[in-house]
Image (tube, rainbow, N blue to C red):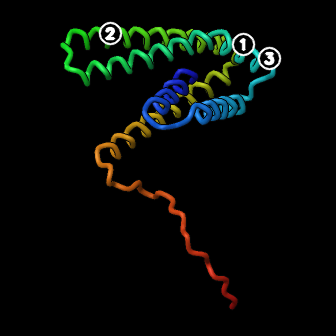
Amino acid sequence: MNKIIILALCLLFFCSKISAHEVKYNYDNNRATMYNALNLTNEQTKIREEILNKNAKILDEKYAKLKKESCKLLALKKGNVCNSEILEQKKVIKNIKKDISKLLSEEDKEFKKCLTNEQKTKYKTIQKLQKHDLKKEINREKIYKANPQMEEFAKPQISTCKRQKTSY
């Protein structure tokens, strides 16, 4: 669950122009929603917060390093550099992603230890739903990236006209 949320936020953070404050707000909002859905006790919430805070600095460093190395890869691709250097940079990025996913899976395992069987099943369904939503969002972004002139379907439009009150 935590892994999916963080990956989704990273995708949004790297691929779009969202401020860090908005990302933090969305992450906190998702966390609160998960806590409510699982009906966590105060002890469980405290344990979860401790688990998250324990690796927060390490994850922040890893994400900063990932962003730096990704920018370096983009620079290598834009410049006329041989493929071996690009492949080497891709390996570095892949290793950083592995480290991040390993840390997140360890956090996830620790969190699952404090959950009851009911909460574990709810947690799994929440993870599946979030993974499904993430895939839908990625596919939607691909469609609109391929055809930028295409307007979003059912996009809410703000009307500038004021409705007149009519009496019958």
Q: Residue at x 53, y 21 (%)?
A: 3
Give the structural element (helix, strand or loop) at label 1: helix
Q: Dot 2 corresponds to which residue?
A: 91
Q: Amino acid at mark 1?
A: Glu
Looking at the image, residue 18 lies above or below residue 55: below
Query: 20 and 94: which one is in front?
Result: 20
Q: Nearer the viewer, mark 2 or mark 3?
A: 2
Q: Amino acid at mark 2?
A: Lys
Q: Dot 3 corresponds to which residue?
A: 43
Residue 119 placement, left or right of 20:
right
Mark 3 or mark 1: name the one nearer the start of the chain. 3
The quarter holding residue 94 reads: top left
Quadrant containing the N terminus in the rendered view: top right
Q: Which mark is residue 109?
A: none
Q: Please provide percent x and percent y for residue 40.
A: 75, 25
Q: CA distance from mark 2 to mark 3?
A: 41 Å
Give the structural element (helix, strand or loop) at label 3: helix
Q: Dot 1 corresponds to which residue?
A: 50
- The answer to the question of whether label 2 and label 1 lie on touching residues, with beta carbons closer than 8 A, is no
Crowd class of label 2 (few under 14; some 14 to 19; many from 20; radius 10 Å)? few
Crowd class of label 3 (few under 14; some 14 to 19; many from 20; radius 10 Å)? few
Mark 2 or mark 1: name the one nearer the start of the chain. 1
Query: 116 and 26: which one is in front?
Result: 26
- The answer to the question of whether label 2 and label 3 lie on touching residues, with beta carbons closer than 8 A, is no
Q: Residue at x 21, y 15 (%)?
A: 81
The quarter holding residue 49 reads: top right
